[in-house]
Amino acid sequence: MITVRKYREADKENLQKICIATGPGIKNERHRLSQLALYCDYFADCEPENIFIAADEADNAVGYILCCTNFAGFKTAMKKHYFKFTCRYDIVKWLMCRAELIMDEKLFKDYGAFLHIDILDGYQRAGVGTRLMDALLALLLEKGIKGVTLGVGSDNVKGVSFYKKYGFHVVKQGPGFYKLGIFTTERQQTDREKQHET
């Protein structure tokens, strides 16, 4: 049975393992370190209150959802620490992420948050992603944050399908990627409609 709960510091090692296991094919140690710096460590180090874990029966993380609600802090941290670290190991990724930062900053003004979600293969397509999304959207609503965005590769057919089914819509499209967004009020409306149907 999977439990969705708030992140604890002891989860960080499992977060890192999931980040690597679910990321694009890791080519070498430099690529691995770059992946962690950009898609895991900032959130665990700087915004742990915005992380939810999907834990198995032994209470080990098998999936997570990470969220940034402080873009100014994220941008500063990226430039001062994580981007410099990534530049040393993966210059192409560094250039791509700097461009993405500019794009995300514009979207952040409209939505107020962005997320990453990753679940190990053996636990996908079992409702875990929906439960993680529900937990995060409830937190954002409680905080008065109007919405959240995410990025996904356009070739990730299952991922795109899941996000759209959940209620996300495409807000920007580029070569090989989509940026999708959802407002917390949209999710509330969907939940009300489902309750009405039952």
Image (spheres, rainbow, N blue to C red):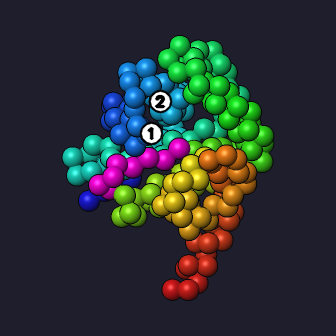
Q: Position of residue 36 (x, y in %)?
A: 45, 28
Residue 114: which quarter of the image? top right
Q: Residue at x 64, y 31 (%)?
A: 96
* Mark 1 touches mark 2? (CB < 8 Å): yes
Judge the density around disc 1: few (<14), some (14-19), many (≥20) Cα neighbours within 10 Å: few
Residue at the spot 63% in from the left edge and 30% down from the top edge: 97
**Residue situated in front as seen by the camera: 14 or 93:** 93
Near-viewer residue (25 or 147): 25
Residue 25: quarter of image: top left
Report the amino acid beneath label 1: Pro
Within 10 Å of disc 2 (Cα), the crowding (few <14, some 14-19, many 20+) is many
Location of residue 7 in the rendering, given as x and y in whole percent from the top left corner? 41, 39
Using the rendered image of the protein, determine whether residue 167 is visible from the camera's viewpoint. Answer: yes
Looking at the image, is 139 positioned above or below residue 102? below
Q: Which residues are magenta?
A: 116-123
Residue with the most extreme left position? 58
Q: Quadrant of residue 138?
A: bottom right
Amino acid at pointer 2: Gln
Sequence order check, earlier mark of 1 and 2? 1
- In the picture, the disc for residue 35 is 2
Q: Secondary structure at mark 2?
A: helix
Task: Tell whether 115 sits left or right of 71.
Answer: left
Number of the label disc, if any, that sits on residue 183: none
User: Is residue 119 part of the magenta span, yes or no?
Assistant: yes
Q: Is-magenta flag for residue 2?
A: no
Gap between marks 1 and 2, in whole Å?
A: 9 Å
Residue at the image point whose x is 27% and y is 51% from the top:
56
Residue 24: give its label: 1
Q: Looking at the picture, how far across and down is residue 188, in whole percent?
A: 63, 67
- Of residue 10 and residue 105, the one placed in the foreground of this image is 105
